[in-house]
Amino acid sequence: MFFYLSKKVAIPDNVKLKCVSWNKDQGFIACGGEDGLLKVLKLETQTDDAKLRGLAVPSNLSMNQNLEGHSGSVQVVTWNEQYQKLTTSDQNGLIIVWMLYKGSWYEEMINNRNKSVVRSMSWNADGQKICIVYEDGAVIVGSVDGNRIWGKDLKGVQLCHVAWSADSKILLFGMTSGEIHIYDNQGNFIHLGTLKVPGKQMSALSWEGGGLKIALAVDSFIYFANIRPDYKWGYCSNTVVYAYTRPDRPEYCVIFWDTKNNEKYVKYVKSLISITTCGDFCILATKADENHPQFVLVLCNSIGTPLDPKYIDIVPLFVAMTKTHVIAASKEAFYTWQYRVAKKLTALEINQITRSRKEGRERIYHVDDTPSGSVDGVLDYSKAIQGTRDPICAITASDKTLIVGRESGTIQRYSLPNVGLIQKYSLNCRAYQLSLNCNSSRLAIIDISGVLTFFDLDARVTDSTGQQVIGELLKLERKDVWDMKWAKDNPDLFAMMEKTRMYVFRNLDPEEPIQTSGYICIFEDLEIKSVLLDEILKNPEHPNKDYIINFEIRSLRDSRALIEKVGIEDASQFIEDNPHPRLWRLLAEAALQKLDLHTAEQAFVRCKDYQGIKFVKRLGNLQSESMKQAEVAAYFGRFEEAERMYLDMDRRDLAIGLRLKLGDWFRVLQLLKTGSGDADDSLLEQAHNAIGDYFADRQKWLNAVQYYVQGRNQERLAECYYMLEDYEGLENLASSLPENHKLLPEIAQMFVRVGMCEQAVTAFLKCNQPKAAVDTCVHLNQWNKAVELAKNHSMKEIGSLLARYASHLLEKNKTLDAIELYRKANYFYDAAKLMFKIADEEAKKRTKPLRVKKLYVLSALLIEQYHEQVRNAQRGKVKGKSSEATSALAGLLEEEVLSTTSRFRDNAWRGAEAYHFFTLAQRQLYEGYVDTALKTALHLRDYEDIIPAVEIYSLLALCACAGRAFGTCSKAFIKLESLETLSSEQKQQYEDLALEIFTKHPPKDNRKSELDSLLEGGEGKLPTCVATGSPITEYQFWVCNVCKHCVLAQEISNYNFCPLCHSSVG
């Protein structure tokens, strides 16, 4: 290898350089020196000459820029290639971030801590974060936009360098003492393992891209080392729980992957410390808040639902979990929490939940204390802050024992649930991972060097001094162990991972190894389940079931081989020598296959399978061998084979029964239809309905309808028609149902929900619920229908119903509709009041007089109908009662009712009379009957309360003037001039007109004798003919049966209808 110098750049004024940094992407070179010197250079690396490539290209400077801003010596320069930024710092602690803009470098932002000098700075791989270390031990991590992410003070150290790992998860801090400390990207210290490599000198090392292997150059050899990370993971209830970080989120993403159903549930957790699992639950240990010293233990179920969080004031560096307790330990103390979950609560326990913490569910103990277990502990965190010379380094627990390991090698054994120190043991290693077997008799210890040893907690041995001691270190020792798990059902069985091999030990004797790199999930029923976490975390959002591997241990494999190749008898002897419930179950199943019922029964007894025993007893009662074989096939889930055997035996009923148990209704229907005999109608219906349910559950309503029709399931049919919006089908279904069927109200409600009033009413009436029908009409604003129904069914609520509907119509200004409503319902009085109100309002508007007259007539006719209704009602009540007292009482009641409304009736007829004469006088005047018009107009003087006086006397003056009755005309003008409603201008106009008339004609009537009676008026006034407006002086005249008004006898022959109320004359 050769080296040579290719170029030299001189610094002006011989300023000494302190640092240099080369931008790997863009090729910029930054150099810093004394007196604030900061330069950015760039070598030209392009040429037009195609022959010159690589190092042969001339290296001329294409940039040479001085950056002004520092006053002291520039000591640190570092590049952010991703965002094209340069970060520099000087001896005064001033930090400047520079940015490239239009080919030159400019200052973007500055920062000065004013406490210490920056010794090193480093941007992470994606350029999002910068880590700055100061000489006094301060560490600050900031974002690319200048915001502070976190800070930490490392006490008692002098920092001189910092570097990020390639994946931005780890920070390396270099000390002036030569030590290197490793932290994660949140500032948490990471404990390291050590690897001893044979050889004299290590010259180089390099990481594999995935981060799970290292290549080491030692002497004349290359060594490769595998890394087994401490993933944050656990296994509970067929669920693998694992955590990873995503570049787009600051929190940990925790995946709960159900390996049985291949479903996953995602939960985001801030500042996750660890994941611990047991049974069906897991504990997520987290930091409560960035700025708060508290921590949280979150109890979750297997889908990540938080059940109970507990806030604690100690750092949960180590967490263990049993079926009843959670134990969290810091270096100095441990906290115990007796947790409860809802499905296990009894009534008594529910009451106990409200008890305070002091009553025993949560306690804390210092590692140097010696609790007796007899006195309830207290939750006193003051104990936790007391130091210890021998910190905790590992913990584990079972249902009755808690083990705490200390850095000196001391192992402390406590009882559970009442925590009492039972025993202390001494080991010659520092434990990294502890694990208890299923009966808490043996403890497995993996130390920080990966050496696995075992300790018998209950053995009594004599030491070198002749004293008897409890506890014995067993002789087995394995190296390079990174995971182990005890069997849940056998205290002598365990599995361990040694390098890339899995060993299974029984009584400390190993079986042949299995090649794998999986992490052990569970060891149960002679099977080991492991998970390939390395593979999963390459693509953590899409875990694959191929990464879950099941291994059978040798005894299970051997038993299966013996059964298959040698026979049941020899296999039975082998299992007798190596008993386990799983092996007995295997034997029982094999015996069943061969119909060896005696052996099968014994095996089921040995594995305590009561259902299996009952099954064997039932098989023993069967006579046919083929029937037994069919039952066994069904027992083992070979349903097609069992069905075929049943059919071969001509036992279609048993085949159908089998499919019924399985819920395979499609096959049940097929069997029922293909049979030679008559199918059971009820079973056919059941099958059709079950298949209909199958399609309905999947919202395939059209398919469901076909089967519900055949199954005559009217209830589900209604639901399907409704979901399909097939309202015609729903209506046909309702019409096909018998009266008072229980489904009719439900169908009616379906129609109500979609606003189909008529169909809903029909359904309600069919099930004899008229009130519900009326309520539906009201709800859907079909008031006419509601009133009609209420009348037809003589409902008491019709009055209130009418009032509600009328108010509804009146709110919408539909007064005539309200009148029609009352009239149809025979509520004539209410209709008359509304009609009279309209007539009054129309009169005030000065609309067409004839229209106003008609409105008053209608009001009067309605009140007449009301009177007739009252009379008929009273007559009906006394019908058949001949006593004079009853008749007299009825008469009095009728008279009272009529008298209260007679005034209202008179007002209606007076309004009709007023506008009748008002229009009649004008018609007579325009037809030339001047004298008759004057007589009619004179009658209008009685109606000043209905027609404005100015109109009455204007008409009277006009008629009198036309008839040359100037005396009457003069009186009319006097009245007009005295009206207060007229303005002074109007009065003046009348005065001018009167002056013009009466200067020509004296104010005297030519035919005074004829007008005397009309002008005098008074009580003895004669009745007026409503046809001519003239007074009736004859004794014979016609009286209307309805309005009781009179017409001259010679005039009535010209009319078919009453001139006032238009009722028939005949």
Image (cartoon, helix red, strand yellow):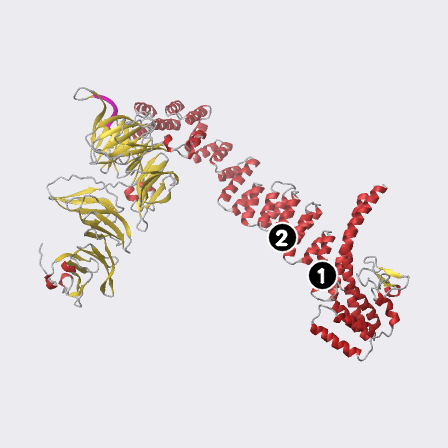
Residue occupied by mark 1: 840
Q: CA distance from mark 2 to mark 1?
A: 29 Å
Q: Nearer the viewer, residue 197 or 101?
A: 101
- Give the prevailing secondary structure in the magenta stretch: strand
The residue lying furthest to the bottom in this view is 1000
Q: Position of residue 229 (x, y in %)?
A: 25, 41
Q: Nearer the viewer, residue 676 or 66?
A: 66
Residue at 69% over, 65% down: 845
The residue lying furthest to the right in this view is 1035
Badge 2 crowding class, 10 Å Cα cut-off, few under 14, some 14 to 19, many 20 or more, is some
Q: Position of residue 9 (x, y in %)?
A: 12, 63
Q: Nearer the viewer, residue 656 or 1025?
A: 1025
- Whether 1054 is drawn above or below 458: the answer is below
Secondary element under disc 1, as helix, strand or loop, is helix
Q: Indicate which label's residue lies in the foreground, 2 or 1.
A: 1
Tell me, yes or no, whether the highlighted magenta stretch contains residue 698: no
Which mark is first along the chain, 1 or 2? 2
Q: Amino acid at mark 2?
A: Asn
Secondary element under disc 2, as helix, strand or loop, is loop
Circles 2, 1 touching at the beta carbon (< 8 Å): no
Residue stretch in magenta: 455-461
Residue occupied by mark 2: 781
